[in-house]
């Protein structure tokens, strides 16, 4: 290699303007250009052909290259193409030097990777102008690269915080199958799971407008509302209403949040479902794997308008243990292959029907999607989850021991706290007092470890008072295949016709030295029920008991449960201590 190195070529950082590489097979051309470059503040390194220039760029990494076109061994076109394949950590300007004036040849200089060209002979003024232009471009490129690097670093930090704040608090992570495949670093899709105090499992799959950081920005407030309201025991329509209000006040015009929301009952007998602007939710039969039911969207996505009545949107669907629930974002059906064909809903359902050796519908869909898209670019975030309706997906209530019935706290008569709440007529239809009361008790006594038990006790007492006391609903309605649907239809009809009916709740709490007692009294306007008849049926082996499980559960958790004649007034006493071994 006949290469001339400058004595300063050990590190181009010490040069005034950097290191210039001159590539030309004519020595006189190299000498003239070297002289001009030195006057402009560059140090110069030389090469006689394109092959030497490529090796120098790999080893020395110059700051600017002046490349002749016609040279032996390797011409300038090929040399520039090879240089552009080198992974340089900076922008390297390349200016072609040529005596050719043919327009096609000059165009080829740019097409092969050059940034500009000079026709021989060239003047010092034109050369200097070209160098100033390249220096300006290089400085801009350097600044852009620096900003891009900082942006990527910031995004990685934000993504780490995002994952811990939004996704890390999900429950039952290893109990269901999911595919979350963002189109960029951030995803506009979000999958959230949380347990309610009732032991129901709430699952939300949502899709913000667009994708990337801008789309993901709403996931943080959404997850905060979802988890806070789930933990406090709010029902599905209340949680959706809370998220909608939050997003309506936060999201810019034109941005919204499509949602699939399911709540799996702790008894695995029904699910509460809402679909707002998303593809169909599919209920899969646990025995055959076939599609049992489709729950289509019946409402606008969240964040568009504040005036949404979610009570009319939420539906209840009967399930059997072992059934599955398939949630998908539109990124699945709208995924495209190299021919710009969409995967489509039909292929999703075909994969469910023809799942072959795949253990789940989820696996079959993922494999079909992978085979369909192959290496085609991903346009949108892809999210898919199959939630099994099995006892493994739910927290095990049976692992929670009942409180000791021998505990008798020493209380001062001077420190009771008491409050009353009475719901009349349409308030019984529009309000759920349980989360509000639990939060009040929590604020008064700080009973976080006992929140779940108290929620269960109060929920069972209130539902019995409202459904079976005020509304006179029979649990036997639930025994048919369409039982829950019919039950809740009748329930809604009777709720809409309430006028003077009521449920009154009294809470009295006393505490002293880390222990206490809470007395819960409910009175309803119903006719009451025959407690002795319930006892008789509960102990009858020949007559299975389809109702009254709530009474038994409350009696197991409380120190005492007393029903006053004629059965429309119940008084439950719960003892607690701060050091109780309670699973909360």
Image: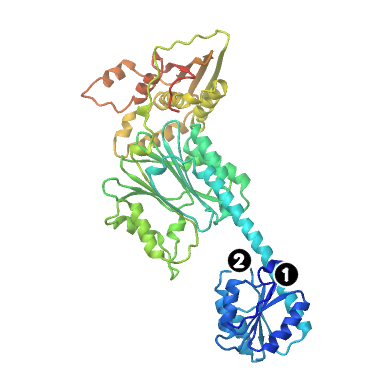
Query: Relative to 121, is 293 above or below?
Result: above
Residue 359 visible? The answer is yes
Query: Relative to 53, is 334 above or below?
Result: above
What quarter of the picture does the N terminus occupy?
bottom right
What quarter of the picture does the C terminus occupy?
top left
**Structural crowding at the residue carrying mark 1, measured as other residues with C-alpha within 10 Å and reported as few (<14), some (14–19) or many (≥20):** some
**Structural crowding at the residue carrying mark 2, measured as other residues with C-alpha within 10 Å and reported as few (<14), some (14–19) or many (≥20):** few
Is 569 displayed left or right of 34 in the figure?
A: left
Name the residue tied to disc 2: 89
* Residue 412 location, quadrant: top right
Nearer the observer, 426 or 214: 214
Among the two numbered marks 2 and 1 on one chain, the one whose residue lies closer to the N terminus? 1
Per the rendering, the mark at residue 285 is none
Q: Position of residue 455 (x, y in %)?
A: 46, 26
Residue pictured at 57% horizontal, 76% vertical: 55
Q: Position of residue 209 (x, y in %)?
A: 55, 54
For the residues bearing labels 2 and 1, Cβ distance under 8 angstroms:
no
Mark 2 residue element: loop
Q: Position of residue 182 (x, y in %)?
A: 49, 56
Residue pictured at 47% horizontal, 29% vertical: 498
* Residue 58 location, quadrant: bottom right
Name the residue tied to disc 1: 15
């Amino acid at each position: 290699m006949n290469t001339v190195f400058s004595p300063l070529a050990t590190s181009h950082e010490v040069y005034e303007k950097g290191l210039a590489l001159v590539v030309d097979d004519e020595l006189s051309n190299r000498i003239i250009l070297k002289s001009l470059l030195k006057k402009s503040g560059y140090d110069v390194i030389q090469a006689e052909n394109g092959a030497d220039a490529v090796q120098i760029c790999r080893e020395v990494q110059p700051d600017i290259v002046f490349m002749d076109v016609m040279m032996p061994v390797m011409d300038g076109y090929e040399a520039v193409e090879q240089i552009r394949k080198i992974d340089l950590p900076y922008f390297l300007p390349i200016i072609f030097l040529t005596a050719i004036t043919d327009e096609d040849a000059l165009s080829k200089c740019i097409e092969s990777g050059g940034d500009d060209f000079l026709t021989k002979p060239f003047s010092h003024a034109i050369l200097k102008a070209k160098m100033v232009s390249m220096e300006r471009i290089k400085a801009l490129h350097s600044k852009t690269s620096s900003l891009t690097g900082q942006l990527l670093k910031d995004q990685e930090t934000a993504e780490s915080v995002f994952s811990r704040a939004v996704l890390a608090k999900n429950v039952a992570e290893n109990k269901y199958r999911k595919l979350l495949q963002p189109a960029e670093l951030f995803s506009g899709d979000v999958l959230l799971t949380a347990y309610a105090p009732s032991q129901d499992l709430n699952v939300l799959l949502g899709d913000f407008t667009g994708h990337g950081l801008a789309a993901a920005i709403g996931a943080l407030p959404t997850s905060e509302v979802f988890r806070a309201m789930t933990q406090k025991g709010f029902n599905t329509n209340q949680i959706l209403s809370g998220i909608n209000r939050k997003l309506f006040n936060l999201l810019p015009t034109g941005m919204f949040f499509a949602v699939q929301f399911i709540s799996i009952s702790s008894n695995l007998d029904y699910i509460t479902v809402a679909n707002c602007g998303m593809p169909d939710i599919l209920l899969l039969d646990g025995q055959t794997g076939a599609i049992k039911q489709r729950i289509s969207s019946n409402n606008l996505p969240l964040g568009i308008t504040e005036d949404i009545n979610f009570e009319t949107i939420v539906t209840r669907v009967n399930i059997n243990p072992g059934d599955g629930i398939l949630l998908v974002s539109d990124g699945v059906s709208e995924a495209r292959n190299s021919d710009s064909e969409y995967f489509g809903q039909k292929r999703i359902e075909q994969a469910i029907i023809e799942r072959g050796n795949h253990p789940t519908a989820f696996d079959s869909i993922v494999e079909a999607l992978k085979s369909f898209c192959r290496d085609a670019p991903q346009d949108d975030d892809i999210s898919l989850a199959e939630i099994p309706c099995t006892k493994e997906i739910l927290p095990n209530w049976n692992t929670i021991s009942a409180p000791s019935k021998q505990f008798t706290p020493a209380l001062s008569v001077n420190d009771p706290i008491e409050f009353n709440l009475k719901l009349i007529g349409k308030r019984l239809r529009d309000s759920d007092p349980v989360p509000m009361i639990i939060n009040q008790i929590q604020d008064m006594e700080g009973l976080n470890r006992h929140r779940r038990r108290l929620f269960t006790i109060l929920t069972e007492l209130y539902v019995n008072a409202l459904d079976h006391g005020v509304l006179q609903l029979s649990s036997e309605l639930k025994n048919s295949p369409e039982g829950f649907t019919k039950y809740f239809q009748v329930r809604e009809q009777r709720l809409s016709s309430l006028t003077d009916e009521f449920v009154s709740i009294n809470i009295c709490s006393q505490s002293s030295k880390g222990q206490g007692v809470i007395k819960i009294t409910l009175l309803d306007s119903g006719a009451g029920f025959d407690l002795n008849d319930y006892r008789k049926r509960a102990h009858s082996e020949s007559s299975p008991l389809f109702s009254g499980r709530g009474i038994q559960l409350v009696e197991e958790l409380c120190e005492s449960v007393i029903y006053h004649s004629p059965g429309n007034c119940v008084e439950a006493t719960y003892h607690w201590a701060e050091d109780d071994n309670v699973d909360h």
